[in-house]
């Protein structure tokens, strides 16, 4: 694993790239604002016949909403370009059981993705045995009644517990708010059970799904992400080239600190270290 600060090397590496996976928040936009030049870079990559897809841990919005959001930034996309933790969870749950009864802690993005695949969202189960899955994602209206129902579905019924992602925090315009991990850990605490699977980053699951669906190999794929313990960790675990972009939550100092730790400690998870670091996407095509 090499840490490249030389843009020439990055461009040389890009020659072998057939698929570029982009995290959204902190890479393409921050809140409601496009990160300068992100639109131009995406268009430039597509012009070079590099397939572009987006992979977000945020399960609150539907993929249709993401298409509309990028449209506002003058970026054309289709629903199939997006792999959110909600869409990944929904696709995978469907492989376990079709037309399942599901209790959801989560927002419209997760609910609609599940419903679109034929699943039934049960909001007030009469019989807890009728619930096949409890799926937990970020829910900004999270409350005690919901967690009590989820607990019963898992402990008194036969529901399998899954999580969209386990991010501890959610970056917002002014700092941080609680992330999906807050809800996931609430259910872990009151059931004593861990999720059967967490679908979002840093698990490599979503990236493996993207590689499988696009039929592009790991060595021809890179991920651009702003967060080391989700985007970069997931990318390295999946064996693709990882590029940290410093337009979001990570600074160069943080990466240098981690590299120092990696040199000292044998226990350190080297998958947290990106292959390449760039200040912004604009540097991809700069000589
Ligand atoms: Mg991000």
Image: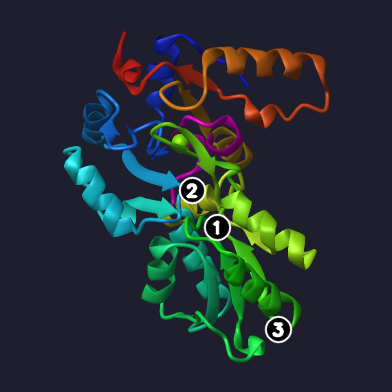
| Residue positioned most to the right | 266
Mark nearer the N terminus (2 vs 1): 2
Between disc 1 and disc 3, the foreground one is 3
| Badge 2 element | loop
Note whether residue 221 is visible.
no
- Ligand 1 closer than 8 Å to label 3 CB: no
- Measured as percent of width and height from the top left, residue 67 is found at 25, 51
- Measured as percent of width and height from the top left, residue 135 is found at 57, 67
- Ligand 1 closer than 8 Å to label 2 CB: yes
**Measured Cα–Cα span from mark 2 to mark 3:** 28 Å
Mark nearer the N terminus (2 vs 3): 2
| Residue depicted at x 74% and y 19% | 262
Residue 101's place in the image compared with 59, above or below, is: below
Q: Nearer the viewer, residue 132 or 285?
A: 132
Note whether residue 4 is visible.
yes
Q: Nearer the viewer, residue 76 or 221?
A: 76
Residue 164 tag number: 1
Residue picked out by circle 2: 57
Q: Which residues are magenta?
A: 215-231
| The quadrant where residue 271 appears | top right
| Badge 3 element | loop
Q: Nearer the viewer, residue 253 or 176?
A: 176
| Residue depicted at x 36% and y 52% | 82
Residue picked out by circle 3: 157
Residue 3's place in the image compared with 196, above or below, is: above
């Amino acid at each position: 694993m090499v840490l490249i600060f030389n843009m020439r090397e990055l461009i040389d590496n890009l020659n072998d790239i057939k698929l570029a996976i982009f995290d959204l928040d902190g890479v393409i936009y921050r809140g409601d604002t496009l990160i300068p030049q992100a639109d131009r870079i995406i268009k430039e990559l597509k012009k070079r016949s590099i397939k572009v897809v987006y992979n977000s841990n945020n399960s609150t919005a539907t993929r249709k909403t993401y298409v509309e959001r990028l449209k506002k930034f003058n970026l054309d996309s289709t629903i199939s370009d997006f792999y959110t933790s909600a869409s990944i969870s929904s696709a995978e749950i469907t492989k376990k059981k079709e037309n399942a009864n599901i209790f959801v802690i989560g927002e419209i993005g997760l609910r609609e993705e599940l419903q679109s695949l034929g699943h039934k969202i049960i909001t007030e189960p009469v019989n807890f045995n009728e619930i096949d899955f409890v799926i937990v994602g970020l829910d900004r209206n999270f409350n005690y009644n919901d967690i009590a129902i989820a607990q019963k579905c898992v402990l008194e019924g036969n529901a399998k517990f899954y999580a969209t992602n386990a991010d501890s925090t959610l970056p917002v315009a002014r700092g941080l708010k609680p992330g999906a991990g807050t809800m996931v850990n609430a259910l872990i605490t009151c059931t004593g059970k861990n999720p059967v699977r967490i679908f979002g980053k840093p698990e490599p699951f979503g990236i493996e799904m993207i590689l499988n669906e696009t039929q592009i190999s790991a060595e021809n794929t890179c991920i651009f992400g702003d967060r080391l313990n989700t985007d970069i960790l997931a990318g390295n675990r999946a064996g693709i080239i990882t590029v940290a972009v410093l337009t979001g939550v990570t600074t160069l100092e943080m990466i240098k600190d981690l590299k120092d730790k990696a040199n000292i400690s044998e226990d350190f998870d080297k998958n947290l270290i990106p292959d390449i670091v760039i200040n912004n996407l604009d540097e991809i095509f700069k000589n």
